[in-house]
Amino acid sequence: MSNHNTPYAIETRKLTRGFGDQPVLRGLDLRVPTGQIFALLGPNGAGKTTLINILCTLLPADSGQALVAGHDVATEREQVKTAISLTGQYAAVDEILTGRENLRMICRLSGLDRVTADSRTVELLDRFDLTPAADIRAGRYSGGMRRRLDLALGLVTTGSVIFLDEPTTGLDTRSRQALWDVISALPELGATVFLTTQYLEEADRLADRIAVINNGVLVAEGTAAELKAAVGTDVLELRDAADDVITELGTDGTATGLERVLAGLTDEQRRLRVSVRRPSLDDVFLQLTGHTSDAQADNTDQGAAA
C-alpha cells in the first residue's frame, strides 16, 4: 500500500529482479530521504541501472515493493511518471535543432502552452548557462554544453524526484565541475536527486548520503564521512621516483601503528618515498566491493597505455 506522507522520496523493500537465471537485485532495501542528493555506487553489474529502470517504471520487479514519491511503481505508474524526471548518461538532444528549439519542442510535447513553453525555455537556458548558445545548432555544442542541455531537457517539467544516471560520464574535468554546480542547486528547487556515478569524487562532493550496492544487495549506506570512518585506517602510500603509488598499506593512524607497518617493509620498499593519507571513497569502494571504481580503473588503464 502506498504511503503518500512518507519522509522518504524513494523506498524499496526486499526488491528482486533477475534476467533468465541470473539474479541482479537480491532483496534490496533502500531509503532515500526527501530533499537530499543521494548517490548510488557499485561496480558494473551491481544492479544500479536495473534499479533505476524499476524506479522509473521502465522495468517491472520480480518481487518486493518500490515506492517513489509515496507511489507504488507497480500499481501507480502514472503517478510515479508525473513525479519524476529522468536524465541518462547519453545526451538525447536533436543535433539539427538549436538549444532553444530543443527545449521549446520538449516543452510543447510535455503539454505546455506556447507562452508557458517560451518562458520555461528562457528560464532553463539561463539556469544552465546556455543563453549565449541558445540559437546555435546543438550539433556544434561541446560535450559539456550538450550534457547541460540534456539535463535541462529532462527538467522541462520538474518532478519531485530527479534521476541522474551517470550524468557526467565522458565529460572533461571542467565541464564535469560546471555540471556539479547545477546538480548541487537542484534540492533548492524542492527536488530529491537520485544519482548514479562512476566518479567517486562526484559522490563525495555532491551527495548528502551515499549507498553502495554489490551483487544486488546494499552493503553500506551513510554520509561520505561515515563511510570513510568505517574503513577504520589511514593509508600509507609507498611511491617511486616518478611519484607513482607502488603499494598501499593500512595503518590505524597512531605512531605505534605506523612504526609497526614501517618495520615490516622490505629493503626494497624502504627505498621508496612514504606518505600517509586519510581514507578516500576509493578505499571504501574497494573494501566493500573488492573492485576499484570504473573511473579509477579507466585512469589506471590510460596511465599504463601512456
Image (tube, grey):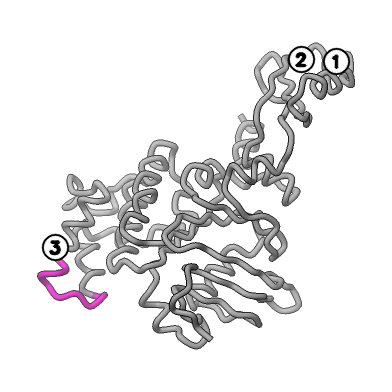
Q: Which residue lies at the image location 71% right of the left edge and 30% below the top edge?
A: 234
Cβ atoms under marks 1 and 2 closer than 8 Å: yes
Q: Secondary structure at mark 2?
A: loop
As drawn, the residue found furthest toward the top would be 271
Q: Secondary structure at mark 1?
A: helix
Q: Which residue lies at the image location 64% right of the left edge and 46% below the top edge?
A: 227
Q: CA distance from mark 1 to mark 3?
A: 67 Å
Q: Secondary structure at mark 3?
A: helix
Q: CA distance from mark 3 to mark 2?
A: 61 Å
> Relative to 304, is 132 on the left or the right?
left
Magenta residue span: 109-117
As drawn, the residue found furthest toward the left would be 115
**Which of pointers 1 and 3 lies earlier in the amino acid sequence?**
3
Query: Disc 1 marks which amino acid?
Result: Glu
Percent of width and height locating residue 39: 53, 54
Percent of width and height locating residue 208: 49, 50
> Relative to 199, is 161 on the left or the right?
left
> Relative to 81, is 62 on the left or the right?
right
Percent of width and height locating residue 12: 59, 72
Q: Which residue lies at the image location 63% right of the left edge and 37% below the top edge?
A: 280
Percent of width and height locating residue 229: 67, 40
Q: Which residue lies at the image location 43% right of the left edge and 39% below the top edge?
A: 172
Q: CA distance from mark 1 to mark 2?
A: 7 Å
Residue linked to disc 3: 119
Residue linked to disc 1: 268
> Label 1: how many residues lie within 10 Å, few (<14), some (14-19) or many (20+)?
few
Q: Quadrant of residue 247?
A: top right
Q: Nearer the viewer, residue 179 or 149?
A: 179
Residue linked to disc 2: 272
> Label 2: how many residues lie within 10 Å, few (<14), some (14-19) or many (20+)?
some
Relative to 217, say whether 230 is above or below: above
